Image: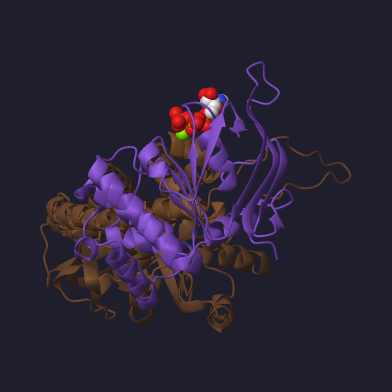
Amino acid sequence: MASEILRLEKVCKAYNVGLPAETEVLHGIDLELDHGEFLALMGPSGSGKSTLLNIVGLLDRPTSGRLVIKGQDTAAMGDGEITHLRGHTIGFVFQYHLLISAFTARENVMMPMLVDRGFPSAEIEARANRLLAQVGLEKFAGNLANNMSGGQQQRVAVARALAMNPDLVLADEPTGNLDSKSADAVFELMRQVNRDSGTSFLLVTHNMELARRCDRIIEVVDGRIQA
Amino acid sequence: MNRWLPFEWITAVRFLREGRLQTIFIIGGISIGVAVIVFMSAMLAGLQANFVKRVLTSQPQIQLLAPDQVARPLRNAKGEIEDPIVQRPSQRVISIDQWPKIRSQMQAMPEVVTVSPTILGSVLVVRGDASRSVTLSGVEPDSYFRIVKVPDYIVAGEARLTSEDIIIGIELAKDLGATVGDKLNVRAASGATRVLTISGLVDLGNKGVNQRASYAALRTAQSLLGMIGGVTTIDMTVTDIYAAEDIAQRIQAANAVEADSWIKTNAQFFTAVKAQQTTNTLIRLFVGLSVAFGIAAVLIVSVIQRSKDIGILRAMGTSRGQILRVFLVQGGLLGFIGSLFGAAMGAFALVYWHAVARQADGTELFPLILERSLFLYTALLATITGLLAAMAPAVRAAKLDPVVAIRG
Ligand SMILES: Nc1ncnc2c1ncn2[C@@H]1O[C@H](COP(=O)(O)OP(=O)(O)OP(=O)(O)O)[C@@H](O)[C@H]1O
Ligand SMILES: [Mg+2]
């Protein structure tokens, strides 16, 4: 088996296909990500970073090109298979709308496991507690999502992204809304997880200082990867 | 989190709880709708039951009569010409042919409960200067009182009918200035006369009837009316009151008698009930529809409000089917919870209205019938309505593109 977790070959993405407003946003992206690699994705606003991340995260499909995750070509997969693969191999951390407000911190972390198993269990709850302890928030486990600071919410979101023990975590500007101290804490947390458990990370950020602390930096400009 | 609830239920309940005011208002709306249906249905059933009870304890369920007497014109034989107009002959009071045989046949039918031969005729009752023309029913008290509950309607004296007794309506007693123990001169059209003693007064609940009703023993009435051994009607009760018309038709087809069921003689009442039921069904339908639209509207708004939550759930591996069910469960729960409150409200309104609404004589307007089946049925219907109403919002939620939802 190849050591890469993710491989993109000539991935293109166009919006509004077939309409007068059709615009191609990604033009033939080639990208590989190794197991355990921590990759920073940079680039100006509107260059297509989020679009790329959505495709990698199986939330969206490329217009053309190949996307191979853990050796599986995703092009032929149906919606059910895609959803299953996403749930089991990929964790997300978003910039906004971090947590589901109807649930507590612990429940938010339990959610991916609950979705997968169907029923809650002591085991799921224990794992959520462990993950919350790992991000240093065991005291806030019972708090509703809205009763926490942005940095705390983002750390809960990282814990949630790790709930299913994914191979790859996709983080789209997770620190964009945080002050530099909280941003640093969230970043260090992800880096720690990456070192301890070998989870690969794909991090979109505008913060050069954080990007320099990653294994590799890739720059996207106008839908192309800059050398 | 409740260990026994699956993901869909947990999420549905949380979404509803977080939606607080929305949830409270829509449940209020559903409750009112359900309450209206429960109240209306139960009251209608009560009124109907009351009427049926009244009719069935004061009238036979099936009454057999001698067939109509028809004029049989001579057929055009040689030298005879048929009159184009055949006049209906005046109807003599005649006995049912071979009635003891018919009675035993009736008693042999499994659907028939009680059979009682009766003679009906007009007589004049005279007391001093006062005289009234009344209908005299000659009955066998043992069987007849099981069909028409005369003893239940006795207001003075007792339901005793020896050959010298007569029971009369209270209005008639008033008109004659007579009371229990007084003697009445009873005179038939033929001139035959008997002196009978008032043994009881009855109130059959209707002034006209109370002015004309009188009961005597079968033999007494037979001799007065000049029909020794004859009866004019055979009164019956049956096991299934709503099958009475069917049974009557079968009897009429098989015997030389006319059979009238209570359903036929009270046709007006049944027409009224039909009309009521149609109205009731329409009201139910429209209440149901407006409840459904209310639920759908609230859930559509909820789907839009929660599109980011839905996107996040989808990103963490929730399938379209799971999202669909989260919203279906919300619809079903709204319907079910609304029906519980609604049933309670409806029941409360019924109890209150039952206590307040009285007939002119102070008796209850309708019996309080709180059938469990009505509540179960309503709850089931409301839940199904909720599920159906949630269909469109749920499909919309399931189809939501997670990318669009998350970018929001
Ligand atoms: N659903 C869509 N329909 C049409 N155009 C879209 C859609 N989503 C994104 N775009 C366009 O695609 C381009 C890339 O958008 P994308 O969100 O990937 O940029 P980005 O690199 O993430 O920018 P930012 O740093 O501001 O987040 C933009 O020009 C955007 O307008
Ligand atoms: Mg972006």
Tell which of B136 and B60 is nearer to you.
B60
Measured as percent of width and height from the top left, residue A121 is found at: 38, 75
Measured as percent of width and height from the top left, residue A173 is found at: 40, 40
| Chain B palette colour | brown
Q: Residue at x 66, y 50 (%)?
A: A7
Q: Residue at x 24, y 58 (%)?
A: B344
Q: Mark yes or no: residue A15 visible.
A: yes
Quarter of image, res B250: bottom right
Q: Mark yes or no: residue B187 visible.
A: no
Tell which of A129 and B140 is nearer to you.
A129
Position of the C terminus of chain A by quadrant? top right
Way the structure is coloured: by chain
Measured as percent of width and height from the top left, residue B215 is found at: 30, 68
Q: Residue furthest top?
A: A20
Q: Which chain is purple?
A: A
Measured as percent of width and height from the top left, residue B43 is found at: 29, 53
Left or right, residue B191 beside residue B131: right
Q: Is residue A21 above or below residue A4?
A: above
Q: Is residue A169 above or below residue B221?
A: above
Left or right, residue B71 beside residue A49: right
Left or right, residue B246 beside residue B371: right
Position of the N terminus of chain A by quadrant? bottom right
**Number of marks in the image?**
0
Q: Residue at x 36, y 40 (%)?
A: A209
